[in-house]
Image (tube, grey):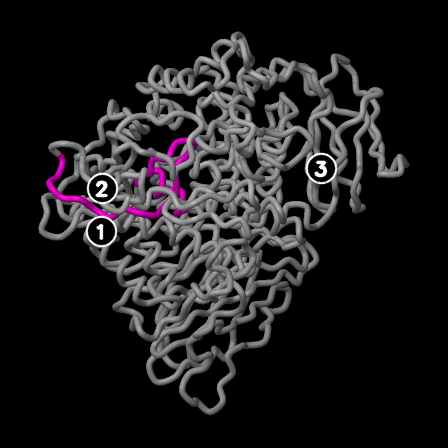
Amino acid sequence: MSTGTTLKRRRVITIAAIAAVVMTAGVVNANTASSAVYPAGDASIRLNQIGYAPTLPKRATVVNTSTTPVAWQLRNAAGTAVASGTTTVKGNDAASGDYVHTVDFSSFTGTGEGFRLEVAGRSSHAFTIANGVYNQLAKDSLAFFYHQRSGIAIQAALVGSPYARPAGHLGISPNRGDTDVPCQPGVCDYRLDARGGWYDAGDQGKYVVNGGISVWQLLDAYERSRNVSGANRNAFADGSQAIPEAGNGVSDILDEARWEIEFLLRMQVPVGKPKAGMAFHKLHDQNWTGIPQRPETDSQLRELHPPSTAATLNLAAVAAQCARVWKTINPTFATTCQTAAERAWTAARANPAVYASGSDSTGGGAYGDNDVSDEFYWAAAELYVTTGSSTYSSFLASSPHNAGASVSKNFGWPTTAALGDITLATVPNGLSSSTGATIRQRIVTQADALLNIINTQGYGVPLGSAEYWWGSSGEVNNRATLLALAADFTGQTKYRDGALSALDYLLGRNALGNSYVTGFGTVYSKNQHHRFWAHQNDASLPNPPAGSLAGGPDSALEDDIARQRLGGCAPQKCYIDDIGSYSTNEVAINWNSGLVWLAAYAAEKAAGTTLPTSAAPTSAVPTSAVPTSAVPTSAAPTSAAPTSGPPTSRPPTSAPPTSGTPTTRPPTSSPPGGGCTATYKVVGQWQGGFQGEVTVQNTGAGATASWTVSWTFPNGQTISQLWGAVHSVSGTTQTAKNEAWNGVLAANATTTFGFIGSWTAANGVPATVSCSRT
């Protein structure tokens, strides 16, 4: 099923109910709305309104009916022209209905504030060009989650007095949740403490299936920072966010994710109860609440809704991810997560088709999903990477989604197989190098398809004209993630540039000239559908905080405000910044989690981080990423230390004394005329195991077509996993040949492949590492 169709199903039954709530609560309607529909051509120059990085692409779209190129100039804050050129005529853009030109001013690499692009006598909004242009966006998009926390007071000292509020749903009158929550009648005969977590969106419900992907994206952003060569390991350092846990020695993004994880753990059916180990699908008010309403004033009964297989597998996947990330940070919490994950997996296998009702939409979204084969695949992937157990690798091999078979540009809460593939492609694990290569190539193939879409669009967005559905902004984030991963895997800048083009769209390079991120840009969304960020309805309440992402255009027009105000809109213009338009202008944790991932990636690249030349991680392998049969759990290295500095507990970096054997072998040249070198290095070692990497450099005058590296271990070491090359063994000779994506190396260019190995008496480096090329 398509993401668009499924996302619409979340609230398709609730539209009338919500409309009634909106009207009775006094929310603006078509006659009283203070927000304006953006007219076509309101700002003829549409660009990223916060700005660009000096050495990264800088592109804009101009609405102009000329059929021939027109002149443009880039002016600095003093009004001096610093770059100039002519536009490229793009023509009719189906998604917007505009006739457009594009401008590429990437060749200008200066820095400063107050730049403006002038085209045909019109001037753009002012913007910045700087290396740190995305840093605040990365911070504020993550801060959104602290604002959305349930069960804790939001402190004025951390968010400012307009956003401060008492704890919501802690069983303090008038609240009737969430410390002692009953089930819906007939569902169970007990009550749960289900406090904490994040409010899902504009409502105050808490949903396991949407919480699952949201937590996963935050944890995946963290894991990428630890596992991808060249990534910013300090992206989420302790103390970088304004949250109560800052300064505790743990990465702030992990502190934020843990708030939701602990809620998810509380949603598991207790031991000894029917369907033990499964997860309740959701928790919310018995009926829809009105707008505005702060959570501490909610007097409605809160209820647990029946367990579902989808929710159970979300819990299994995220708890398994939690177990490996917290392995060395907090072993006790890691054990709790792993136990919950394994219980959930067992329960899901015993109850493989318990589906949430698509009509269970009174008081909260339904989040129905009748195909959970993708959730099974995702959960198995996370459990396999964490435990190395053949139980999960065998399940993966038999899944219809195996090895990226169903990787799609459309992934989201109802379609999660890609989450498992991303984990298998980026976190070290025991799958064969060929399987890992297959998954990565299939992600790259999807990225190629997305680039094709971008290249056909007037506004450089990875959405076709028929793909503007509920939550389209979140869809843009997720597709940008695939593009960024393709850049990680291949080192090719075209994929990085595609991801950044997607971000440009969100920040103002779109048909409405509107930034969908509150507080970022000159014209931005500020009246999102929300129960207590409701300034449009009540002047005593605030607008959403900076970093809040609006859902974006929805061409189906699925609420009364949209239908009344946007009839006949072109798909990319089917948006209105009005609190009553929940189908185009709501916020949601799964949309902001994707923005956190993308903003962190953009900030990393803007800072000048080079693209990796290896398709797989080169940092120390997570404890749980190596099969337990190969590496003792107590001795494996960690990749999950706090981001405020290097891991606090590293394995030994040398083997027991072996006559001073070095851990790095200097570059070894190929035979005369070969034109390449290979440098062998041990990058991490523990009792009985190690991680190595080999860097191949083209020392010839021309580009390589392929390369081959071979060596013999001096102490009988063996390799259990290798990535970034195709591995084979003949007798005692290890051979690694390039994969399809990294065989071509320009003169002096390098690529690196890595591997996990085992040793017994000693772990000496090879005497010779040969390299040959064609």
Residue 145: give x, y in percent of width and height.
46, 45
The amino acid marked with disc number 1 is Ser
Which mark identifies residue 58?
3
Question: Residue placed at 46% from the left, 62% from the top?
Answer: 736
Single out the residue that lies furthest toward the bottom: 659
User: How far apart in space, not on screen, are marks 3 and 1 (Cα)?
Assistant: 47 Å
Mark 1 residue crowding within 10 angstroms, few (<14) / some (14–19) / many (20+): few
Which mark's residue is nearer the viewer, 3 or 1?
3
Image quarter hosting the N terminus: top left
Task: Name the one closer to the observer, 376 or 582.
Answer: 582
Q: Which residues are magenta?
A: 187-216
The amino acid marked with disc number 3 is Lys
The amino acid marked with disc number 2 is Val
Residue 439: give x, y in percent of width and height.
40, 46
Disc 1: which residue:
394
Question: Residue placed at 23% from the left, 43% from the top?
Answer: 312
Secondary structure, mark 1, is helix
